[in-house]
Structure formats: structure tokens, C-alpha cells
Amino acid sequence: MQYRIRNWSEYNAGLKQRGSLTVWLSEDALKQWLVTTPTGRRGASQTYSDQAIATVATLKSLFHLAGRQAQGFVESLFHLMGIQLSRWT
């Protein structure tokens, strides 16, 4: 038995949808992305929350990225969403 495509426009739309990437972050996650309170210990304060680090690590693992590639990926997503990722950018 051989499968034949009859509706090419629907088939093409399905193939394009496979490459679609949707990223959703809740407002709560965005508010907690940066650590704003000092730790009270010596040394540099943390910049990103544990939740932010876990999110980037998940994306890193999911897309088989190296560390800096994952950082660039997340920065580009935030740039496209119009969200300021860190205090320095």
C-alpha cells in the first residue's frame, strides 16, 4: 500500500509547522529572571535566578547546544520578544 498526498497545500503547511518554534514564559518567570536582592556574602552577587538557569539548561539540553550557543539562543529569543534580558543590555 502506498500513501499518496492529495492536498499539497495542507501537506506543505504541515511541513512548515514542524519547524515552528513557540516559546512561552509566564509574567512571573520574567519577573523572577534576575536576582535583585544581594546575598549578603562576600564576592559577586548572583545575576540570574535558579529558575532562569534551569530554563536555559533545559533549552540547552533540548536543542543539543553548547553553553554559549544556549546563551545566544536565549538572548535572541528575548530580543525578538522585545524583553530586556539583563541589566546590562
Image: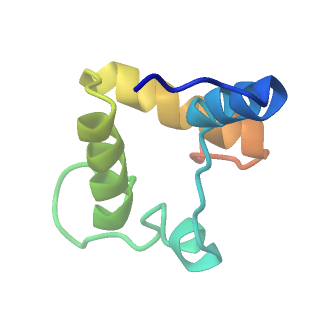
Residue 50 vertical position relative to residue 21 in the rendered view, above or below: below
Q: Quadrant of residue 81?
A: top right
Q: Nearer the viewer, residue 72 or 58?
A: 58
Residue 89 visible in the displayed image: no
Q: Nearer the viewer, residue 7 or 59?
A: 7
Residue 4 visible in the displayed image: yes
Q: Quadrant of residue 31?
A: bottom right
Residue at the extreme left of the image, as rendered: 42
Residue at image point 48% right, 61% down? 34
What x and y, as percent, mark residue 15? Answer: 63, 27
Q: How is the image coloured?
A: rainbow
Residue 34 vertical position relative to residue 69 in the rendered view, above or below: below
Residue 20 vertical position relative to residue 35 in the rendered view, above or below: above
Q: How many marks?
A: 0
What x and y, as percent, mark residue 55? Answer: 36, 54
Residue at the extreme right of the image, as rendered: 9
Quadrant including the N terminus? top left
Residue at the extreme bottom of the image, as rendered: 28
What x and y, as percent, mark residue 74? Answer: 50, 37
Residue at image point 35% right, 42% down? 59
Residue at image point 41% right, 30% down? 71
Residue at image point 60% right, 46% down? 85
Residue 82 vertical position relative to residue 10 in the rendered view, above or below: below
Left or right: where does residue 12 sit relative to residue 4?
A: right
Residue at the extreme front of the image, as rendered: 1
What x and y, as percent, mark residue 82? Answer: 79, 45
Q: Nearer the viewer, residue 17 or 29?
A: 17
Left or right: where does residue 58 sit relative to residue 27?
A: left
Quadrant including the C terminus? top right
